[in-house]
């Protein structure tokens, strides 16, 4: 076996149908082309998952991937996660966590874990270095995610890291999560349901092998430099302590209408000034901060509610302010009412974002008399905590109307019928996290489109902003955006298409943002600004070289991001996704959004169509279909994939 640096050097295959376990060497050529983590996992999923299969069938595949940087002491690279075919959207799904089992999987000797088939009964996959066992887990079936993690460690020992599903995944809720180490969430589009369909209750991992990097002295030097830069950042205190980020980030987004309430029906500018204030969070909810593996930032928190009508024991949450606050969407009126459903989402293993959106959708349909009291199992649906808690229980256990809502907004709208689909707000089946009708400032009525919210249209998972992180979510001058583009490695010839003296072209910049972000996220980088600000295309290339011993130029690193992004696009294309699936929800293009005293107009269909055309052109995709052209695929070294494109 050859020597690997950064990489563990192995891929572990587990077939739950036959109980077969095998180990193979990591393909070095694939590693250089797809980098690691999400990148290699995307290629493996594309090759292993047959087009048209039912996402909840044994034929679907779960691929867990870890990057060559994850598990080292380089700050900022804790993230690892899964790739599969989504039961919510029927398309590509990827999700990663900063509190993942990824580092421990690397220490056990594996870069990737491929899980196929379906066990006859509930099982727990136990990995202890070279020893891999598929153990019965019927005694844990029915446990919530907290109970499951505790039960595994009680049986096996505290040194095991855990990844598990709760009742949401067991009952095949289409937006069920996988919960890692009691608080990391592989969320949004149903990875928990895929695990549940395989009767895979949990994965437990223990590893002691460690990781070797190629240039240890240079690696340590760069790690110390990055750590010093992070320590000096004013963003650390803002993100770490007592919810200070609420006023800096959440408040303006609510005031601009980027976040809103009542099924995307109206703004919620009062959210951070009257309902969810930073002061109340600091005094009543926040207990302490904690950090992801190897991270000096500590931007996550332990929260809880002491006493009152909705007490919640202290628990860890990755987005401790944002997740509870977003429940204003369906009627939460204070922190107590926001924390309770956020806690239940983690406990049951369901995606909080999709849960609150589908509940809001149901209430909206009830208010519009599309749903009757009989449809709602005799309950009155209203914008209040009682409805929220009632529907969470029904969704998790697929009870009555909950069985319909558990299918997600898109499919629930189809099943309900009677005009429900026009109120179903989604992109590719996934509810968007940001509204396209938000304004530039709280006093401005013109919609402000920026890279992250338009990026939701192109994200292969559907309506989520996390794959198109950029500096443009804060309005900036052209020179600032230009410096940012240079840091990503945007080629000179593309700079000429993106920038003029006084303007920048959003869709053309977005293409390069997607390539860059896909590259760094495949290598495990945290997307929060105190981390992202420290890495550009040049030091990412340096880091890859000194970690792995394999030389890739900055442009080759960026090209690898584009190769991964195009592979994910091809996955969706062969599942039938077309240009129309990149369009905003009907509601955002037909209805204005009232935000306080302002009324923001709907997104303009013609403007969005033009943006898509420019994005496709910049990407080398067919303008009519949005499918990568053969020429582009060959350019990216995807010759086999090019042969399959019509």
Image (cartoon, rainbow, N blue to C red):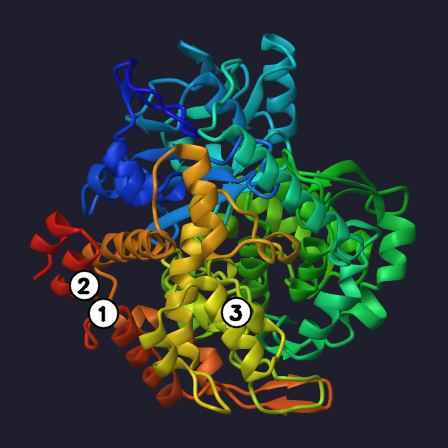
Mark 1, residue position: 620
Mark 2, residue position: 632
Left or right: 414, with 594 as reference point: left
Mark 3, residue position: 484
**Other residues around mark 1 within 10 Å, as few (<14) / some (14–19) / many (≥20):** some
- Proximity of marks 1 and 2: CB atoms separated by less than 8 Å: yes
Residue 367 place in picture, x, y as percent: 59, 73
Q: Residue at x 68, y 48 (%)?
A: 342
Residue 246 in view in this figure: yes
Q: Residue at x 58, y 41 (%)?
A: 222
Looking at the picture, does residue 124 appear above or below residue 385? above
Under tag 1, what secondary structure?
loop
Count of numbered tags = 3
Under tag 3, what secondary structure?
helix
Q: Residue at x 36, y 82 (%)?
A: 496
Q: What's the distance in space between the residues labelled 3 and 1, CA to CA?
A: 22 Å
Mark toward the start of the polypeptide (3 vs 1)? 3
Residue 137 place in picture, x, y as percent: 48, 15
Residue 274 sits in which quadrant? bottom right
Residue 463 in view in this figure: no
Q: Residue at x 36, y 24 (%)?
A: 4
Residue 176 place in picture, x, y as percent: 49, 42
Nearer the viewer's eye, disc 3 or disc 1? 3
Left or right: 486, with 349 as reference point: left
Left or right: 248, with 117 as reference point: right
Nearer-the-camera pick, 193 or 641? 641
């Amino acid at each position: 076996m050859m020597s690997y640096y950064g990489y563990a050097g192995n891929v572990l295959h587990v077939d739950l149908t036959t109980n077969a376990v095998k180990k193979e060497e990591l393909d070095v050529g694939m590693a250089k082309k797809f980098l690691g983590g999400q990148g290699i996992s995307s290629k493996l999923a594309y090759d292993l998952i047959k087009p048209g299969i039912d996402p909840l069938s044994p034929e679907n595949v779960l691929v867990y991937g870890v990057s060559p940087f994850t598990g080292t002491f380089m700050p900022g690279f804790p993230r690892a996660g899964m790739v599969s075919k989504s039961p919510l959207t029927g398309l590509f799904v990827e999700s990663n966590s900063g509190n993942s089992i990824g580092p421990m999987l690397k220490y056990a000797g594996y870069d990737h874990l491929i899980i196929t088939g379906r066990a006859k009964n509930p099982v727990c996959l136990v990995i202890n270095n070279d020893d891999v066992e598929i153990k019965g887990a019927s005694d844990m079936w029915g446990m919530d995610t907290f109970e499951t993690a505790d039960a595994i460690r009680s049986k096996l020992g505290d040194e095991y890291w855990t990844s598990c599903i709760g009742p949401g995944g067991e009952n095949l809720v289409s937006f069920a999560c996988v919960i890692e180490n009691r608080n990391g969430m592989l969320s949004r589009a149903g990875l928990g349901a895929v695990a549940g369909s395989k009767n895979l209750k949990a994965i437990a991992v223990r590893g002691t092998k460690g990781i070797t990097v190629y240039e240890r002295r240079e690696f340590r030097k760069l790690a110390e430099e990055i750590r010093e830069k992070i320590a000096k950042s004013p963003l650390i205190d803002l993100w770490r302590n007592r919810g200070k980020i609420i006023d800096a980030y959440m408040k303006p987004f609510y005031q601009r209408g980027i976040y809103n309430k009542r099924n995307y029906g109206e703004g919620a500018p009062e959210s951070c000034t009257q309902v969810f204030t930073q002061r109340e969070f600091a005094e009543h909810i926040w207990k302490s901060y904690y950090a992801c593996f190897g991270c000096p930032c500590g931007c996550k928190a332990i929260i809880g509610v002491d006493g009152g009508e909705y007490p919640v024991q202290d628990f860890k949450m990755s987005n401790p302010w944002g997740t509870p606050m977003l429940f204003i969407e369906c009627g939460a009126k204070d922190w107590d009412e926001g924390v309770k459903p956020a806690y239940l989402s983690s406990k049951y293993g369901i995606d909080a974002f999709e849960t609150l959106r589908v509940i809001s959708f149901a209430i909206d349909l009830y208010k519009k008399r599309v749903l009757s009291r009989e449809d709602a199992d005799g309950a009155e649906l209203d914008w209040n905590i009682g409805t929220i808690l009632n529907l969470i229980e029904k969704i998790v256990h697929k009870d009555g109307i909950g069985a319909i809502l558990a299918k997600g907004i898109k499919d629930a709208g189809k099943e309900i019928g009677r005009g429900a689909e026009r109120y179903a707000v989604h992109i590719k089946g996934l509810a968007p996290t940001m509204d396209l009708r938000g304004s530039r400032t709280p006093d401005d009525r013109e919609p402000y489109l920026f890279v992250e919210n338009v990026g939701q249209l192109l994200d292969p998972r559907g309506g989520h902003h996390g794959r198109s992180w950029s500096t443009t979510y804060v309005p900036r001058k052209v020179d600032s955006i230009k410096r940012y583009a240079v840091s990503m490695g945007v080629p000179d010839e593309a700079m000429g298409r993106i920038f003029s003296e006084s303007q920048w072209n959003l869709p053309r910049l977005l293409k390069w943002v997607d390539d860059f972000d896909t590259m760094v996220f495949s290598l495990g980088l945290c997307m929060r600004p105190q981390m992202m600000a420290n890495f550009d295309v040049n030091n990412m290339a340096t880091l890859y070289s000194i970690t792995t011993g394999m030389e890739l130029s900055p442009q080759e690193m960026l090209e690898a991001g584009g190769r991964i992004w195009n592979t994910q696009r091809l996955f969706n294309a062969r599942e039938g996704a077309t240009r129309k699936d990149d369009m905003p929800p009907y509601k955002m293009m037909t209805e204005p959004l009232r935000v306080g005293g302002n009324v923001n107009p709907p997104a303009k269909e013609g403007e969005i169509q033009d943006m898509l055309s420019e994005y496709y052109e910049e990407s080398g995709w067919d303008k009519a279909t949005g499918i990568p052209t053969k020429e582009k695929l060959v350019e990216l070294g995807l010759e086999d994939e090019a042969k399959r494109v019509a």
